[in-house]
Structures are given as structure tokens and as C-alpha cells.
Image: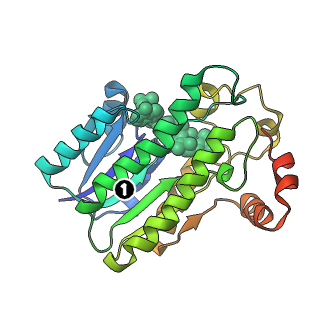
């Protein structure tokens, strides 16, 4: 049974991945959907005409990794596609506001993504794909979202690393680096109305990001940055002095 496992499938970009999958990967027979909210997962599952299993799990919690591991052992899925999309980002300086929010970014964006990937890889085979949702925030440190941008730098570096490790097994890994998207993320992160940079930047369309990312993963591309504007930004972050980039990228 060929399975696609999508974290954060209940909203935003994850939901767009789910909707794009039947056309992009018709050979995948079953979708496994993970996020915290059962009702939202059930509603997302109704959007597609495929067999879905829902797993209401909080990926910041260690006990969720044990549960996922037991599901894998019980159902023995052939994971053809893993989309690590669950993520959060909060605006605010380190040392100010709630510690809980800074830790939540580390626990979800780094720990959760690492744990799910580690548990899924033994169930993947030749031709399987991993898509990890990173961000343009991974290109250089973004003051006022320091932990978020550092967490996404990890996601991109982690993706490149596992891509190399998995080459011999014919499994690819793609880091997807979109710019801002108009999803719950912007409101939940306290960004809306509180960041001039976010107000000025062009927004990416999550429908196009999902489709583009699936096509990039099929090509075996290691990093996918949607839109010309952000491709240029990625290049600038490589070439321009770090201090200048950090000044320009302050959220
Ligand atoms: N929106 C942007 O501007 C933007 C830009 C670049 C990159 N990204 C990245 O894109 C990805 C998707 O974000 P989005 O914009 O689609 O945000 P979103 O609409 O807020 O969706 C986030 C998804 O993650 C799930 N999630 C949140 N906390 C979780 C937890 N503890 N355990 C399991 N699942 C959890 C949410 O479901 P529940 O709440 O039900 O758990 C939801 O399905 C993230 O990795 C984000 O960092 C976003």
C-alpha cells in the first residue's frame, strides 16, 4: 500500500498539498494526515476522493513519536511520499515575551520534523520522496524571528544532509523555501499588522507552492524556492555580506 504522510495537513499549505496530490501522484493509494486537531483533519480528509487515515498528534510531544512508531509497525506502510509541513513561527525578540513560544518553534520545526523523518525512513524505498517545508527565512538570520529563521536553516541543512545519505537508496529530499503566504501562520505568529517587512514582501500562493514543490520533488531537486523574486533573494543571501542581508531581512 503506497502511502503519502503529510504533517500539518489540516490547514494552509498542508491542505493545498493534500488537494494537489491525486493529480500529481496518482499512484499513491492512501493519505496519512497528521496534526493536532481531529475535526480539522476529518474535514481535510473529506476534500479528497482517496482513502485517508487521520492521526491527531501533537508533534512537539515525545509521546507522539512513540505512537507514530507503533502505527508504522502495525500497518507497515510503504511511504512513497513524506511531507513534513507542520510548523510555527512567532514574531518577537529572544528574551522578551513568552518562553513557551520560542520553545514551541524548536520543538515543532526541529524536533518534530527530525523525529517523523527518522521514523519514516525505514518504511521508504527506491523512488520515495521527502519534502521538508523550510522558508526563505532559512537563507539568513531574521532578527525579531531569530528562532524561526534558525529553525528553518536547520530544516534546509537537514534536508541536504539526508538527501546525501539517502542517495544510495534512491530516495530524494527536497527543502521547500516559500516567502510569506496568507495562512493562519501569519495570524497565529502575531505577525499580521506587526511587521513592516511582511507588509512589503510579495506573498506566495500556497496552491502554486504545493504544486511546484511536488514537481520539484519528482525532479529530485534538493532546494525549491518559489517565484523569481525569492530565487533572487536566495542568490543575494549567498553573495551579499551577511551584515547587510541581516539588516535588510529584519522582520
Ligand atoms: N505562511 C507563511 O508565511 C509561511 C512562509 C514560509 C514557510 N512557511 C511554513 O509552511 C508550513 C505550513 O505553514 P502554513 O503557513 O500552512 O501554516 P498554518 O496554516 O498555520 O498550518 C500549520 C499546520 O501545522 C499544524 N500544526 C501546528 N502545530 C502542530 C503541532 N504541534 N503538531 C502537529 N501539527 C501542528 C496545524 O494543525 P493543528 O493546529 O491542528 O495542529 C496546521 O495543519 C510551516 O512549516 C511554515 O513554517 C509558512
Colour scheme of this structure image? rainbow
Task: Pick the residue in front: 24 or 68.
Answer: 68
Who's the residue at 43% across and 47% down the image?
113
Who's the residue at 43% across and 65% down the image?
162
Query: Residue 247 location in percent, x, y?
Result: 86, 46
118 up-or-down from 198: above or below: below
Q: Is residue 151 visible?
A: yes
Disc 1 crowd, CA 10 A, few/some/many (<14, 14-19, 20+): many
Left or right side of 216 for 172: left
Left or right side of 74 for 46: right
Query: Residue 152 location in percent, x, y?
Result: 59, 49
Q: Residue furthest top?
A: 97
Q: Quadrant of residue 98?
A: top right
Q: Residue furthest front?
A: 95
Who's the residue at 77% across and 38% down the image?
251
Residue designated by label 1? 82
Query: Residue 10 location in percent, x, y?
Result: 41, 35
Amino acid at each position: 500500500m503506497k502511502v503519502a504522510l503529510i504533517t500539518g495537513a489540516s490547514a494552509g499549505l498542508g491542505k493545498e498539498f493534500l488537494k494537489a496530490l491525486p493529480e500529481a501522484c496518482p499512484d499513491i493509494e492512501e493519505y496519512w494526515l497528521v496534526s493536532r486537531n481531529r475535526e480539522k483533519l476529518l474535514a481535510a480528509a473529506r476534500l479528497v476522493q482517496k482513502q485517508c487515515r487521520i492521526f491527531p498528534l501533537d508533534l512537539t510531544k515525545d509521546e507522539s513519536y512513540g505512537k507514530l512508531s507503533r502505527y508504522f509497525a502495525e500497518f507497515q506502510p510503504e511511504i512513497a511520499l513524506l511531507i513534513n509541513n507542520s510548523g510555527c513561527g512567532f514574531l518577537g525578540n529572544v528574551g522578551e515575551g513568552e518562553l513557551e513560544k520560542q520553545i514551541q518553534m524548536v520543538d515543532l520545526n526541529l524536533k518534530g520534523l527530525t523525529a517523523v523523518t527518522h521514523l519514516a525512513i525505514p518504511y521508504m524505498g527506491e523512488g520515495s520522496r521527502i519534502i521538508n517545508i523550510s522558508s526563505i527565512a532559512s537563507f539568513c538570520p531574521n532578527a525579531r524571528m531569530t528562532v524561526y529563521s534558525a529553525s528553518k536553516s536547520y530544516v534546509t541543512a537537514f534536508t541536504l544532509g539526508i538527501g546525501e545519505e539517502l542517495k544510495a537508496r534512491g530516495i530524494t529530499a527536497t527543502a521547500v523555501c516559500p516567502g510569506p503566504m496568507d495562512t493562519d501562520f501569519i495570524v497565529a505568529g502575531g505577525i499580521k499588522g506587526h511587521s513592516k517587512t511582511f507588509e512589503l514582501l510579495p506573498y506566495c500562493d500556497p496552491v502554486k507552492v504545493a504544486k511546484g514543490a511536488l514537481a520539484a520533488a519528482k525532479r529530485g531537486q534538493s532546494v525549491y524556492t518559489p517565484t523569481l523574486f525569492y530565487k533572487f533573494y536566495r542568490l543575494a543571501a549567498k553573495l551579499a555580506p551577511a551584515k547587510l542581508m541581516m539588516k535588510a531581512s529584519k522582520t
